[in-house]
Amino acid sequence: MKKVMLFAILLMGCEKKEVAADNMASVAGACSYDGRKTVEVLKNVEAVVEVIENFTFLVPKNDNSKRYIACNLPDNLTNLKKGQIVAFDADVKEIFPNERWAGLPIKITKFTIQE
């Protein structure tokens, strides 16, 4: 029975998508934005981490008029400092007409910490 429980716990841990590289972070599979349509796909966006009142935003280096807020930030992002450079691929999710957001909602598909 203990082996079955251990196996079940290990399987639950496999729900996170692991990106294989030293400077890459794991990206959680589930996202609260999954019910929304994808309106744009972003590839290899370099961004700066910005923290405002407990919210973590990703601001593209080449366009600081945009801010992204991810539903599935990697666990180790909490260790990063404001101003950290990252790169990511993501799906931009729709914003409903009756909503106001501080940033564009995204679901990250690949995440790299720049050093």
Image: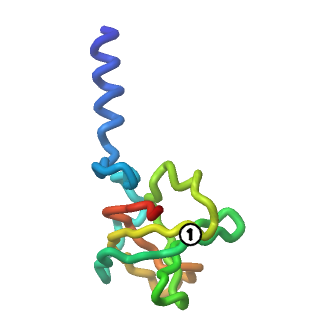
In the rendered structure, the answer to whether residue 16 lies left or right of residue 64 reads: left
Residue beneath the point at 29% across and 32% down: 11
For the N terminus, which image quadrant? top left
Image quadrant where residue 107 sits: bottom left
In the rendered structure, the answer to whether residue 18 lies left or right of residue 113 reads: left
Residue 76's x, y, as percent? 50, 49
Q: Is residue 4 above or below residue 11?
A: above
As drawn, the residue found furthest toward the right would be 53
Q: Is residue 100 above or below residue 5?
A: below
Residue beneath the point at 33% across and 70% down: 89
In the rendered picture of this protein, how many numbered marks are placed on residues? 1
As drawn, the residue found furthest toward the front would be 115
Residue 88's x, y, as percent? 37, 69
In the rendered structure, the answer to whether residue 101 lies left or right of residue 11 reads: right
Residue 93's x, y, as percent? 37, 76
Q: Which residue is mark 1?
A: 49
